[in-house]
Image: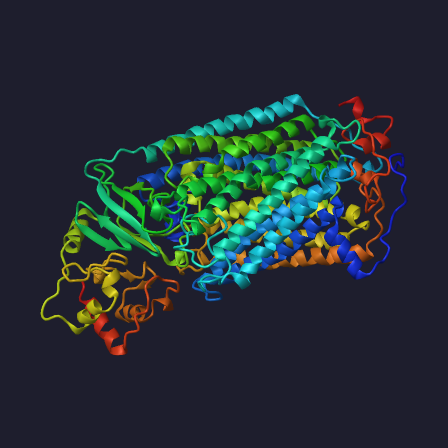
Amino acid sequence: MQPSLMAAFLLAAPYLSPTNIFAPASTPAQSILDLSVFVLEVTGAIFVVVFALLAYAVVKYRKRRSGEGREPAQVYGSTQLELAWTVVPVLIVVVLFLAAARVIASIQNAPKPANAVEVTVIGHQFWWEYRYPSLKVVTANELHIPVSDPLHPTPTFLTLLSADTDHSFWVPRLAGKTDLIPNHPNSLWMDPHETGLFLGQCAQYCGTQHALMLLRVYVQTREEFDRWVREQSRPAQISGPVSEGQKIFERTSCINCHAVLGTSANGRFGPDLTHLMSRETIAAGAAPNTPANLRRWIQDPNTFKPGSKMPAMGLSDRELDEVTQYLETLR
Amino acid sequence: MSTQTISLPETYEASRPFVEQLHQWVTTVDHKRLGLLYIFYALLFLVVGGIEATIMRIQLIRPLNTFVSPQVFNRMFTMHGTTMIFFVAMPLVFGFANYLLPLMIGARDMAFPRLNAFSFWMTAFGGFLLYFSFVGGDGLYGAGNAPDVGWFAYAPLTSQTFSPGHSTDFWTLSLLVSGFGSIGTAINIIATVVCLRCKGMTLGKMPLFAWLNLTMGGLVIMVVSPLTAAQLMLMVDRYLGGHFFDTQAGGSAVMWMHFFWVFGHPEVYVLVIPAFAFASEIIPVFSRKAIFGYPVMVAATVGIGFISMSVWAHHMFTVGMSSGANTFFVLSTMAVAVPTGIKIFNWLATMWGGQIHFTVPMLFCIAFLFQFLIAGLTGVMQAAAPFDWQLTASYFVVAHFHYVIVGGIIFASFGAFYYWFPKMSGRMYNERLGQLHFWLFLIGFHLTFDFMHVPGLLGMPRRIYTYEPGRGWDIWNLIVTIGVVFQGAGVLFFVANMLWSRFRGALAGRDPWDAWTLEWSTSSPPPDYNFARTPEVRSRRPLWDLKHPEDPDWHYE
């Protein structure tokens, strides 16, 4: 491809799709793309050459009336030719292999700087748990990380664990995918060069709702990120007398799975709800976090996520309203 | 046309009562009948697997569609993958090997006719067992139905915890049973090729078809065994309290991946090597030239067989192997491109300087060459591990392996159907219907699988039953689904052609293509035991020698 054409294509890439692998926004994704473009050029050239030969042979050596009744000259082989199309591919393979090996090492063996942000990602059927061990933050489904200045990089290193089945963490614009496998900790790093929301989703089939196990990564300026950390590390801000909704929440099975820091709810099976209202979506990105959606979700999770592990608790309309109101106070 | 090798008159099946005919088919140990049974069985399941694919494509035609539930969708992709690999592609290549190998090497049957029948029925009942899950899978727990763990059934999703009920057991048992059938057939193929060649047919004078199927047989023995072992271990985990893959008790999910892919990757070559075999017979005949570089073709085939057993972990670039392991599997995987490239160039060189007849089998083979080239190149892209970190488990990889399996294996198999149909049925197919089938299927294939690469590059993972608008995937999924209509129409013309031609086609005679291998020296369809007098050959193209006594091949080999 012409360099200018390629440049125009890469410029347009983010607008084609928010998860386009041709629109990298961090170093690992960028070095993968650089290798990919090189591999595409080499394989593209091979395709053009071989396709041209095939097309030429098909047109030039098609059966003609004049040739009828006579067999063409029988050729049984040619050592020189066959040697040529053995040696040339071997050379191409060596070049491609070396290019790939270099990128593997640069990404997989990158040292972790002391100022790196560390996050433990735990895959669950069908949502993401994020823990920031040194920052005392536990949250779910929406990952917040700081932007990284190329001159003073502050990369984020993820430790990938799974609570149940295999999952895979894939945010195409930030890094290649890496699997979350039970009993098999993995790691992944990224250093986003721009702020904004980056989308992705689980890329390893993990059960019924694999499709709606969506990933949202919010890349923030350092100041915004620090403020977010301060807010998230506080316990729930509950003032005044205990609301009716909180009572219902705490006496039904909600607290077997959900935690609200600062209250008696300390379940760990489902997402931490301490700062639920600071999140833009619910149900691992399946729906916007609006009071109406929240109410529908509590009433019966199967309505927009059939197969979700959260059971419908069979609350009455009044109880639903109360619980929704309570959850809306968890900012 | 020579009559030196065979002097039997054309035989016709006397009309017998239906029950008697059925009894003969069910109890047969004849390699030709078993070959046809394999092929019919594969075609039946091709339609079933195609219906499953169509259900998935209807569901994905637009975002947030609700044609089927996620549970049904997950069963569909599990059943589609399992069916197409184990109960379409495998029986198809075994069927052709069974039918053609004895004919091509001048033998009267396979080496072990009763093992042959046993193997077919094991494979057949394996498939029926899998489909019985729709009825019986509810089991004791009322959970599940057909299996929904994906065709590679990664642990620990298959454990009792995450897959209660019996759906996974049906999957495990059916692959266990059909695996025994595959190993039996592989033993049979190897024994036949090694022991039953006619006089004069040294290993170096076998048709390439025999070499390729010999390699395939060796691969099957090597790689189906670990799959069978893994299935047994999974059953021990599920019912006898084993912990091989049970991660909650310290088992290893990654070990299942290794077991599965040490089967799963060479399996691709188990299927594609017979497709190479079809192309290696059809391309020379319709180019009117001997195959170019026979010894190198043999070496490349055996080379592919060996290298293919050292590449399995390229399916696992994202599971967290060390950079050293990843680098090794990049090299071994890219190395396969060398012998594969040799084969493509040698087929091209066979066509070069020939007189290409655009019959339906040749059209399918030319399309096979073109598509296999692209499939190989997208394979090289994914062999570069970092690129694969983006591509794997996305729709790009789905497009890639359908390019191999449909664009390569199925296209070559359609070529083989048309090429050997006159031999198997005694009648010619309808050329016009065949052309219609080819062009419809070609258009449908390219609409579906060319455009399927794009959503993968745009971040669409495989195995999702729905997706949101706004990800840039909608239009591509629509085009992909439209292609299915053309493919389905093409297959309808194929079935119509086979049925019509079986009864109404012109009589084929023994050698309608003016071909060169031994199966064309006997009547169509061949009589019981194939050859009244076993033939004797002096070169790789015995019929060429007979037709051109002034310039026989053995002067040059």
Residue displayed at 29% across by 62% down: A282
Residue A323 in the image: x percent, y percent? 22, 71
Q: Is residue B390 above or below residue B502?
A: above
Q: Is residue B250 above or below residue A53?
A: below
Number of residue marks? 0
Query: Is residue B177 rendered to the left or right of residue A329?
Result: right
Residue displayed at 23% across by 43% down: A118
Can you name the residue that lies furthest to the front here? B240
- Note whether residue B279 is visible: yes
Q: Is residue B199 above or below residue A295?
A: above
The C terminus of chain A sits in image quarter: bottom left
- Note whether residue B96 is visible: no
Residue A294 in the image: x percent, y percent? 28, 68
Query: Is residue A210 rendered to the left or right of residue A149?
Result: right
Residue sitting nearer the eye, B504 or B425: B425
* Colouring used for the render: rainbow
> Which of the 4 image quadrants contains residue B103?
top right
Residue A319 in the image: x percent, y percent? 24, 75
Query: Is residue B161 rendered to the left or right of residue B152?
Result: left
Residue A312 in the image: x percent, y percent? 32, 69
Query: Is residue B460 rendered to the left or right of residue A150?
Result: right
Residue sitting nearer the eye, B432 or B264: B264
Can you name the residue that lies furthest to the left here? A240
Residue sitting nearer the eye, B237 or A227: B237
